[in-house]
Image: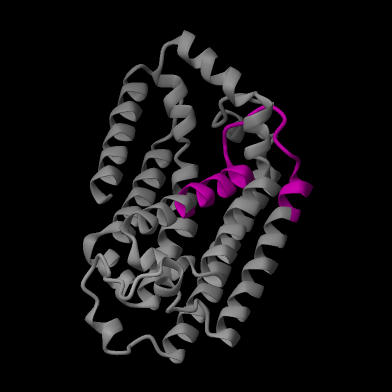
């Protein structure tokens, strides 16, 4: 997975440099932002981090914050959609715009839909046996991380995406979505803290197996590391770490709203209003 992240970063770099060489108007700040987002993803998907996240709920929570909350912010500010559209042929760009203007994409990229996919996925993971199953099945483990990244990216893009896609919801809709996200995220953290979630020990009963062996060696879990205090520490990390990420999004959202009609900002968009 870490190799895929590096490949995405390399592809973006090549496309960005080609655009700059052709004299297109795109700032170096976008490259720096995207590069920082890729760096956060690389840290979150590094083998040592993956193993720590499998062995320790606190490590998992660090991964969650990096992959689903912080990296998407900087990747979105890198404007990969604009970089892609400026790199392909006009015919392909027109085809992509038809897709972007379709009802299905507008529905999926609406802040409330993205909110449901993002926060709803967290509730499902931490309040059901899915978390334990992700420890026992590598395919589920990777699928969970992929979902969190894609849902987190979609949610951030629906709020602060710089590409002025037609019919993007107004500032009030996006503010409502981010404040709902803050409230639902905080409520989930409190549930996890009080109820000592995510619960473990479901995998054997659900699968009917006598024993379930992890796809990683996890001696810490076998030794009984997964105590109530570890789960509560993870909930606190998620609570405050999520608050910081959501505050960053809010600041960016208000800055974009304030300067949206200024020429210096309009030039950064692909479709100026």
Q: Quadrant of residue 183?
A: bottom right
Residue at left 56%, top 25%?
270
What secondary structure is the magenta-colored segment mainly?
helix
Q: How many marks?
A: 0
Based on the picture, tell me whether residue 139 belongs to the magenta stretch. Answer: no
Q: Quadrant of residue 104?
A: top right
Q: Quadrant of the C terminus?
A: top right
The image position of residue 4, as x and y in percent, is 28, 43
The image position of residue 39, as x and y in percent, is 31, 53
The image position of residue 242, as x and y in percent, is 54, 68
Q: Residue furthest right?
A: 172
Residue at left 49%, top 16%?
93
How are the residues colored? one colour
Residue at left 40%, top 17%?
88
The image position of residue 240, as x and y in percent, is 54, 75
Between 155 and 199, the one nearer to me in the picture: 199
Q: Is residue 80 above or below residue 141?
A: above
Magenta highlight range: 148-176
Is any part of residue 61 visible from this angle?
no
Based on the picture, tell me whether residue 154 belongs to the magenta stretch. Answer: yes
Between 96 and 85, the one nearer to me in the picture: 96
Q: Is residue 7 above or below residue 195?
A: above
- Determine whether, in the image, residue 95 is placed left or right of residue 184: left
Is any part of residue 161 visible from this angle?
yes
Between 17 and 39, the one nearer to me in the picture: 39
Q: Is residue 168 above or below residue 177?
A: above
Residue at left 28%, top 49%?
1
């Amino acid at each position: 997975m870490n190799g895929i992240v590096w490949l995405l970063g390399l592809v973006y770099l090549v496309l960005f440099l080609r655009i700059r060489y052709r004299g297109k108007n795109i700032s170096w700040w976008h490259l720096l932002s995207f590069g920082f987002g890729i760096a956060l993803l690389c840290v979150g998907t590094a083998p040592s981090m993956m193993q720590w996240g499998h062995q320790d709920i606190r490590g998992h929570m660090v991964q969650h914050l990096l992959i689903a909350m912080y990296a998407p912010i900087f990747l979105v500010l890198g404007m990969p959609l604009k970089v892609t559209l400026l790199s392909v042929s006009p015919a392909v760009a027109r085809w992509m715009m038809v897709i972007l203007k379709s009802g299905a994409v507008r529905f999926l990229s609406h802040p409330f839909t993205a909110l449901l996919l993002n926060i709803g996925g967290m509730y499902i993971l931490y309040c059901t046996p899915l978390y334990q199953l992700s420890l026992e099945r590598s395919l589920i483990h990777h699928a969970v991380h992929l979902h969190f990244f894609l849902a987190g990216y979609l949610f951030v893009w629906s709020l602060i995406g710089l590409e002025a896609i037609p019919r993007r919801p107004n500032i009030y809709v996006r503010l409502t979505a981010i404040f709902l996200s803050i409230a639902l995220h905080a409520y989930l953290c409190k549930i996890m803290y009080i109820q000592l979630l995510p619960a473990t020990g479901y995998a054997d009963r659900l699968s009917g197996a006598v024993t379930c062996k992890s796809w990683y060696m996890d001696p810490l879990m076998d030794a009984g590391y997964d105590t109530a205090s570890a789960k509560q520490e993870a909930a606190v990390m998620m609570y405050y770490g999520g608050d910081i990420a959501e505050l960053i999004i809010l600041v960016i959202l208000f800055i974009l709203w304030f300067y949206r009609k200024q020429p210096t900002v309009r030039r950064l968009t692909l479709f100026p209003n």
